[in-house]
Every structure is written in C-alpha cells, then in structure tokens.
Image (cartoon, rainbow, N blue to C red):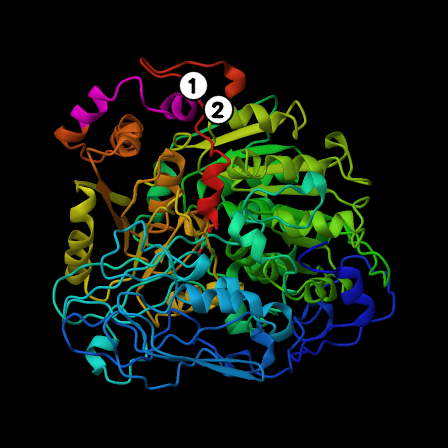
Amino acid sequence: MADEDWDSELTAGPSFSFTPSFPKLETEKAFNYNERSNKGGEGEFPKNDGPSRRGFGANRGFGFKRGNRSDEEGSNLFGRGGFKGRNEDSGSDYGKGDSNGPQRNGGFSRRSFRDGNVEEEFGDKSAGRGFGHSENNFAQRRGRGTGARGTHGGFGRRDENNDEESQSGFGSRGGFGYESRGRGGGFRGRGDENNDEENQSSFGSRGGFGIQTCYEGRGRGSGFRGRGGYKGRNEDVGSDSGQFKNDYTLKSDEDRENDDKPARVTYVPPPPPDTEDGIFAHYQTGINFDKYDDILTDVSGINPPPAILTFEEANLPETLTRNISKAGYVKLTPVQKYSIPIVLAKRDLMACAQTGSGKTAAFLLPILAHMMRDGVAPHSLDLQEPEAIIVAPTRELINQIFLDARKFAYGTCIKPVVVYGGTQTFHSLRQIYQGCNILCATPGRLIDIIKREKIGLTKLRYLVLDEADRMLDMGFGPDMKVLVNSPGMPSKEDRQTLMFSATFPERIQSLAKEFLKSDYLFVVVGQVGGACSDVEQIIIPVGQHGKKDKLVEILQGLGIERTMVFVKTKKRASIHGDRLQKEREEALADFRFGKCNVLVATNVAARGLDIENVQHVIIYDLSDNIEEYVHRIGRTGRCGNVGKAITFFDTDDNEDRTVARSLVKVLSDAQQEVPAWLEEVAFSASGTFSSIGSTFASVDSRRGVSHVPGGHAQSAFATAEDDASWD
Ligand SMILES: Nc1ncnc2c1ncn2[C@@H]1O[C@H](COP(=O)(O)OP(=O)(O)OP(=O)(O)O)[C@@H](O)[C@H]1O
C-alpha cells in the first residue's frame, strides 16, 4: 500500500518520536456487562504520558502568521508563514515562523522552515509572488526522509493580480483563504507580533478542513485574497476501495506525481479529556427546545413500537441513566422518543430529523442499553470483534460521535474506539487492540482495517450510518457496499442497521433498502430534508465581485459572535490540497474553544459538527446541492438555540439558479420569508433545478413517489466531483 504500510508498522513498531503510553493490555478476561466505578478499569480512557502535543508547532501551522506586518501600501502580507511539514511527531518547532525578513512587494521575503533536524530558509521571492511554488515543490520533494509531507504545506501562489481562481493556492493543497486588507475591519491571523491586541482578537483564526480563515487587516481596500483550493487526502472523499489501494483520496495528477513514495502518516491525535467534567461537558439547550414537541412525527413501516415520552419509560440501565443525566439530558427530543424504542425492539431504522435535534443519542443510547444488558464479548488479545460499527463521513464528526459514545458508556466495560484517516495507523490499531466494542470509523480507515483483517466482524450486531444519505451516495456508497460484503459481516437479516440524517433524498432511500431489512421503520420528524426551524434564513443577492466586501461588512457587524463561513472548493482549480489532520483538529479546537470566532469551511464541516454557540452561518458560495445547504445552516440553531444563516445568492450564477426552487421550498417550509426576487429566479429557473423532486416529493419512498409539480426526481446526491469539496 502506498500511503501507510501497516504490516511493517506493526512488526517494526512505530518510527516516530512521539510514543503515547498506554496501560498494559489486560489479560483476556471474559465479562458480561459489569458496571464499574467511574475511575479506572477498562472504562477509562488511557492517559497519554507522551510529550505534550502542544509542544511543537502547535497552533503554528501554516496559515499561522507571525509575520511582520508591513504598512506599506502595495506590499504584501505575510511576514512569514512557517511552513509545516507532516512530521508532527518530530517535536520540532517548525511552523513557528521565526524569521524576520523584511517585507518585499509581493510576499514573503523569507521564512523559516524547520523540519525535524533540517532547517531551511528561503530567500526573497519575486515580486508579485508570495512564497509559492518553489517552496512547495521543495517541500514536496522532501518526502519521507524528513517526514515532511510537504505537498500539503507551504503557501501557494499568491499574486497581487490574481483573480480568485488563481489565488487558490496555499500550497498544492491549501485551504480557501481570505485575507482582508481593510484596516480596522480586517481579520488577522494570529500572532503577528506587531499587531495590537485589539486586532488580534478580532477575527484571527486559522482554517481547517480545507479552511483558511481570515487574516490581517491593514492597508486599504477590503479585498479578500484567497488562498484556497483545499482538498484532503483522506477517507472523507470517495475511495477506490474496490481495488484496495489504501488511497482513499482524491488527488490531482500533480499530487500523484509528487507522491510517488508518500510519507507515512504519523499524526497521533491528542487524547481527549479524561476527567469527568471534560467527558460530560455540554452546552445548554435553548429556549426553543420545548417547541420540538410541536413538530409532527411520522413513523412508517409495519408494527412500530409505541414512542416513549420520557427517559424513564425507556427503562435504561442505571449507569446509562446516570450518564444521560450527567450529560444534561432531561427530556427526550422527538427523534429520540421514536427511535429509542424502535432500536430497543431490534428493528432496523431509517430516521430523518432536523439538524441539531439529538440524532446521535437516538442511536447510541439504545445500542448501549442492549450491550449493557446482553453483555459484550470478552476482550481478546488477538482479533477484536466489535459489536457495533458506526460510520460517518468526516473525521471530525466521527470523533465527535466517539466522544458521545464514550460519555454514555462511562463507568462501564463497554469500550468505544475511534479510528480515522490522517492519523497514524499504528495508533489506530493500538486503540483497537486494547478492546473495542463500538468502533467509530470513517469509511476509508475502516475498510483498510477490515481488509487487513485487523478486526473481525462476526460479532457485529449493530451497523450505524450517520449522515446516511451522504454515506450511501456516490462518494461513499461503494465503501459501504464493500463493508457489508466483507468476510464475516452478518447479513442484514442478522444485524441491526440504523441510518440517520437530516436529509434523505428519495433516490438514497431506494439505495438504503439494500442495507436494511424489508420491514425497516422510517421515522420522520417534521419534513424530510427540512431545515431547522430555529435558524433564521436570510438570502442576499450578491454577485461574485461583491461577495468579499459583503462578507467583510457582515463580519464587522457581527463583532465577536461565533460564525462559520462556508465556501465552495473550486472544482476546476488546478491546485488541490488538504490540511494535515493535526491542523484540521487544531483549527476546529481553536474555533470550538473560542480562540478564534470565525471558521471558514468547505462542505467538510457542513454535516454533524456540534459546536456550542455558533450564532451565525454565512454561506459565501451556495452549494449546488440543497441537502448541503440544509446541513450547513444546521451548524447553528442547535438543540433549541436560535441562530441565523445568511446566504449569498448570485443571480447570474447558473449553479445558484439551479438550487433556487429547492431553496424557496426549504425557506417556505421553515416559515421563512422568501424574497420576491428569489421567487422570480426560481420561477425562471424552472426545469433546471436539480433536487427538489428527490428531496421533498415524498416522505417514505415505500409509499410511492409523488412528484412536486414541475419537479423531477433528478438525483440530488453528490457527484463524484462534488466529493472533492469534502476534503
Ligand atoms: N435530550 C437531549 N437533551 C439535551 N440535549 C440534547 C438532547 N439530545 C441531544 N442533545 C444535545 O443536542 C446537541 C445536538 O445533538 P446531535 O449532535 O446529536 O444532533 P443531530 O441531530 O445529530 O444533528 P446533525 O443533523 O447536525 O448531525 C448535542 O450537543 C447533544 O448533546
């Protein structure tokens, strides 16, 4: 396999300098469910005694600017970038960007690159080009020896005169970036030593997930200087697992050329907090939480069990009940009221409920209840055979689900484990080998593990597809087929399959049947694919050229309120890229924990992420897929809290026009104001829209298709090309 050589890693042991310490594996010990004290035992997450992950380059990745700010008009930004290669584990302080080169027109005068033992400095770059291709290429060629996965790093082409497309650089795999140049109103990258405090605390942040966030305000004008075009190298995109290449990435040809011998991924994610407070940290439900009860719920299928109204009615094991209460859950949400008894009754389920309404607990709680009652398999030192597998499309989301599973399983013998791409495989395996009852995984890493027979499937009882419509579409569908056809995988008759999402296009419902027993139940809270009613949706007509100024204006108005900005990856950009997983996680953590308050994201952050107090979502580039719109705006207005989503709609853009009718439907269904101009666009766009028919035509596709007038059940699912935007 190209990217990661598991077998050699396992036999030779890790070759990185950061070695997390784990408790010794316990000898094999059969046990049934056995509640334990809250401390110690297998319910505990092992402490990591390794060196602090914050120690090197932490928060210092590229995109992080410590540079001098030149106030000369016309000179470029970025004093220094601090390129960071892939060798996160080297303990080096690369990425700190500690040189002090004078600014030259057009970009970086110099910067420091320190990678492991190697330190390089780059000289002045030609005017009009930022630190660009040459460095990138250099980094790329560094390859394995230095651990620099340089293709991911480095700032790409920056050209004063670039148009948006050509600005999409940021290394060969950079993120989408902006650079606001309006003094006072700008956004500042963190850590510019010349900056005053006030500016630093404005919108400074770093990107993540194909994200670059905003930077330094200065000079004049308010131009955004993108550095973008991000694409990841992970299983968040469709894979070619059929060939089992262990290359679940979409790479540009250029990437592939430069990747003839790719470096091993060495990133070991920091262990999550293991104090009780950390494990049960949660945010408050909002003022509209009780209004969930007013939403109509529909259950279709034969003989559904009755809904429950309270947690007590579910008659869950004591420890689970205690954990639910520690998590701050007092009252069930509608999807939980219906789904919990269905899963407890061992029925297959497809459940569709609005974003932020508690779908995760709706599948985790009954699965855990079953496992606690029935007992889990004895921990074997050989092959781990999880009872449950949960898959989700992105690394950050699966990690979040794992943290929820760990929370609800706290104090029990049930061991949830998370594995995902972009991290060291040896680390993933270590986690699994210590015991794994619930395996949370992204598809690529999961298929890898299965194909290499690192886990067995014969004991599997539950298969959960979160964001199921995404998991079954063209990007991940093939992986899911590989999964259910893997050796040892119980047939659908012999396992319970659960699917959850806020959107379920009809076409995907049809695909889903292949994975579900024929008598599966379908729970719909509200309307299939409906937007969360707690999100105020505002659509603004903005042309491409007005977007940047508009965004600046809006963000200035919002002040410090936590905001996610969604952009679309330039599919035709010649440069694709990603960010290191470490950087993705740091960016998310910076946003989640309030270090920065604006996160600019591609669709990779559209689904599932549950971040406290995101008050605003700005859709800078409208997705041509209405489902992604619904998910994107659902990052705010969660759990009864209110939020606001502002969407830029370019009336001259064909892709935007394509979703006009679907958008009108989503707005009106959520009792939002539909601007007259949008209705006109929607009307004139008749026949060109894509997904309204398949999304909204019916509730349960088994009841038959009822097309909306003028609609047509053309596919709403992402095309293979769309997958690029997930990275
Ligand atoms: N019954 C409950 N009481 C209080 N909080 C809850 C309850 N159920 C879920 N939550 C909280 O609500 C938030 C949203 O839940 P969750 O992430 O499961 O939503 P979701 O429906 O999966 O959203 P999305 O469609 O965006 O993935 C989480 O912080 C979760 O802990």
Q: Secondary structure at mark 1?
A: loop
Relative to 707, does residue 93 appear above or below in the rendering? below
User: Mark 2 touching mark 1, by CB under 8 A?
Assistant: yes
Closer to the observer: label 2 or label 1? 1
State yes or no: Cβ of the residue under disc 2 lies below 8 Å from any atom of ligand 1: no
Q: Indicate left or right for 664 with 525 as reference.
A: left
- Whether residue 508 is visible to the viewer of this picture, yes or no, is yes
Residue at image point 27% right, 81% down: 68
Q: Secondary structure at mark 2?
A: helix
Task: Give the labeled residue for mark 1.
Answer: 713
Residue at image point 31% right, 14% down: 710
Relative to 5, does residue 290 appear above or below in the rendering? above
Residue at image point 75% right, 60% down: 6
Q: Quadrant of residue 162?
A: bottom left
- Residue stretch rendered in magenta on the structure: 679-700
Task: Give the labeled residue for mark 2.
Answer: 506
Q: Nearer the viewer, residue 191 or 408?
A: 191
